[in-house]
Image (spheres, rainbow, N blue to C red):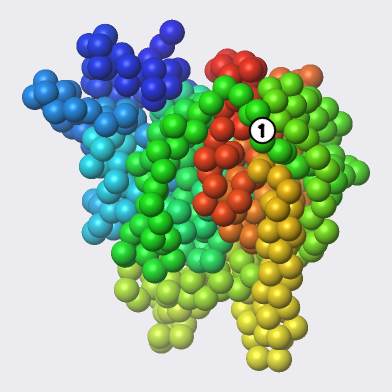
Amino acid sequence: MELFNLTIHELHGMLNKGETTSEAITESVLGRIKAVDGKVRSYITVTEEVARTQAKQADQAGKSGKAPSPVTGIPVAIKDNMCTEGVKTTCASRILGNFIPPYNATVVENLNKAGYVMPGKANMDEFAMGSSTENSGYFVTRNPWDLERIPGGSSGGSAAAVAAGECIAALGSDTGGSIRQPAACCGVVGLKPTYGRVSRFGLVAFASSLDQIGPITKDVTDAAIIMNLIGGHDPKDSTSADLAMPDFTSSLKKDVKGMTIGIPREYFIDGMDPEVDRSVRDAVKTLEGLGAKVVDVTLPHTGYAVATYYILATSEASSNLARYDGVKYGFRAEGAKDLLDMYMKSRSQGFGPEVKRRIMLGTYALSAGYYDAFYKKGQQVRTLIKRDFDEAFKSVDVIATPTAPTAAFKIGEKSEDPLQMYLSDIFTISVNLAGIPGISIPCGFTKSNLPIGLQLLGKHFDEAAIFRAAFAYEQATDHHKKRPKL
């Protein structure tokens, strides 16, 4: 087995026994990037020299007798909307094409302290706006299982890199499903933590009340390992929750005896791919066989989630993206006649079509005369969606749903129809609106060998419950062990 195909915990065990070195693991991953990234296009920036230096330092620390962390010497890719000191951070946008941050995001700093290796910055939909990574300002990332298909989005580069062995794990960000949906498309594990569990300091903002950073990994154990390192209170982020961090690896148990799992009828809908429906229902039966009690629940306001999300997220995007004006940093258009002309030229040339679409939608929703009808109403419906979950969680520990209504679709299939694209996040959006945690794990494959994702949702700050259910299911099946042939 090639080193790049192994998990964090397998490689950590080998490093501890002296069976490999961080330099060997890093060279294996860099070699894999050279071999397949021309086809997959996971990375915007590959940081070979940074990775080799970090690997050397990790091996030296090991020789000095310093106890390694679980990610010491392990290559973890970073989505290109998280600040990395001295390394370009573009958000896959032309407007940040030359931006080199002078500081690290808190999550990157946490991984640095743990001795990780950074192989590069992963491609994404521009400013995390998209479900397919077709909205990148640079190039489209392809799904390692079928190069004619999308890897999901917006963390498509991160998920594709993990699936293709171009890193051992990755960080993504999730505003409406952007970790879970690409994880499902690429047959890997993706966790969106509770809002406030992981610091957003140094994450380039899309929609500040919805964004959350989380891990994309090859299995559930690795997701728990990364969460232990990136979670926790951060005084630099005013929305970071000041709560004690549990050790999530202690939640990984092989049974779910005593747990109650809710199945929401609103998530099994007409138009859903029958293969997805079957795989998810089979997964629920497996959990039942492992000792869980399965009951029906209802989340009655689910039908309003997509409309609510696209009012609130675009409103926050309109506000957050106002800072990109060609003055302080980033792209500045040439040949402007005056200041206003420079703003208009810089923004019209720097932003791609989907970002412009969302800025316009959000600006409209926030404008005088429409604020109450759109933004205020959206916040009121958001409260109702959150209450649906609160009510459901009074009788269940975990809610199980499909992650996406279909497996990965073909590149170009939905790019002409924004509404169809937005509907591919129909099962993930409510989770961000409610602020609860959700994980996507592989639960099967279609006849054409495309991965299918099972989504498990938990109460606020109860990642432990979804880790337990996800791990028990994973140990009883072997979907997570399959790798794409590239």
**Residue 160 versus residue 219: which sits nearer the camera?**
219
- Percent position of residue 214, x then y: 48, 45
Above/below status of 318 relative to 180: below
Q: Badge 1: few (under 14), some or many (20 or more) residues near its Cα, within 10 Å?
A: few
**Residue 450 versus residue 66: which sits nearer the camera?**
66
Splitting the image into 4 quarters, where does residue 227 fall?
A: top left
Q: Residue furthest bottom?
A: 369
Left or right, residue 105 beside residue 176: left
Splitting the image into 4 quarters, where does residue 26 fall?
A: top left
- Percent position of residue 47, x then y: 30, 37
Specify whether residue 180 is in view.
yes
Q: Residue at x 39, y 69 (%)?
A: 238
Q: Residue furthest left?
A: 64
Q: Which quadrant does the N terminus fall into?
A: top left
Q: Which quadrant does the C terminus fall into?
A: top right
Q: Residue at x 71, y 86 (%)?
A: 372
Looking at the rendered structure, the secondary structure element under dot 1 is: loop
Amino acid type, residue under disc 1 in the picture: Gly
Please give the residue where the numbered disc 1 appears in the rendered image.
Answer: 258
- Percent position of residue 378, x then y: 71, 73
